[in-house]
Amino acid sequence: MSFKSIQELRKSGKLEEALQLSKEVLASDSDNIWNKRGAAWVYYEYLKKYSEPKFYDDFKFTLDQLQKLGLPEDDKMVFDNSTWQIGKILFGLQKEEPVNYTKINELFQIVQSFHFTKPSESYTFLYKAFHKGYNNWSNYLSFADWWSFENFLPENYLEEEYNGRKSMAIVEQAYIAYSKKLLEGDAVDSYGQQRELDNNKINEFLPTLSVIIDQHPEYKFLSYFKAKLLLSSGNDENVLSAFLPFAKQKRNDYWVWQLMAEIFKNDKEIQFACYCKALSLKTREDFLVKLRLAMAGVFIEKKMYDEAKTEIESVIQTREKEGWKITNQIAQWQNMPWYEPATIKRDNKEVYNSHLKKAEEILFRDIEEEVIVVEFVNNNH
């Protein structure tokens, strides 16, 4: 009878009365499942009411109360419905400047004890909401492990379309995000400047990533991240074969050749050719700063000082234009004996172009040469 009374009050919009009654019946019989359910749906109505960032404290308090009810594991409906409100406030919080990640962490801490239908549309919405700010969220990997990528729905593997614009499948986004956070590593100092990779976690993730790449070759960027993870973990053996399919598709993007240069770090001539290929492609100068400095270093090793100075001066121009400081590395080079007498060339395109073929040959290394058997020779010709 109490459950029905609470339900009637709730549906008629008398939330305060419904809440008061639910507290009274819980006080008299806290183990009664219907008393708990009645209170849970009242709290759900309050979650709807408070699902904006400006009501965050009230929202969190209500979520806490829902958690403390201790509903059994098979009671999922109220939690499934609550995901839409949790997601709504999460999206709102991540639009604020700056984003308060303490609040994101607090919500994650609470929802871990909730019982959700998996997989489900609402559970995917919960993923999308937490995923939104993954770039700057230090707990993203913990969240992703808890949520579990096994819980994506079949439609989550397909491209999405909104307002006539297509976007990457959420599954592809998820694997990219996970890869990026692994490559970012964990902070080992209070300022987050020194970071350490978790090679065990990388090695655990790589087989799963490989399966997705095999099953979904349309997820083009995953091969790139697989190669990066293999390199970062010191597992160089299969990097090239993992990366080649992607490199062929994206051969006109400079960063493909930048990574290729990293793959061939022990073969200086091929690495040099990859740098040449990367710098030969049309790219915004502010993207090429690190690459030009790497190339300058190679030119210095080769005693090609005119070419080195040309790259360095190009970087200086870009940094000044963007309002960036000149790095210590550049300052050191400027003080070297060779720097002042070296001549700045118009560009280094001639050098780049002379090494393009060597770089491009890498793309076809996995194609076995055909063996041609000559069965007949016409000696009368």
Image (cartoon, rainbow, N blue to C red):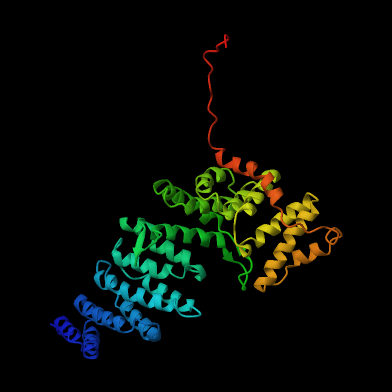
The residue under the point 39% across, 47% down is 215
Q: Closest to the observer: 3 or 163?
A: 163
Q: Is residue 224 visible?
A: yes
Question: Of residues 376 and 93, which is closer to you in this image?
Answer: 376
Say how many tags the image has. Answer: 0
Q: x%, y% of residue 364?
A: 55, 39
Quadrant (top left, top right, bottom left, bottom right) of the N terminus = bottom left
For residue 267, say whether it is visible: no
Q: Is residue 140 left or right of residue 260?
A: left
Q: Is residue 61 left or right of residue 365?
A: left
Q: Position of residue 74 (x, y in %)?
A: 25, 66
Left or right of 323 on screen, residue 6: left
For the view shown, which residue lies furthest in the left direction? Answer: 1
Q: Give residue 69's position: percent from left, percent from top.
A: 29, 78
Q: Nearer the viewer, residue 328 or 305?
A: 305
Residue 276, given in percent of the width and then of the height, sits at 66, 50
Choose between 6 and 267: the one closer to the eye.
Answer: 267
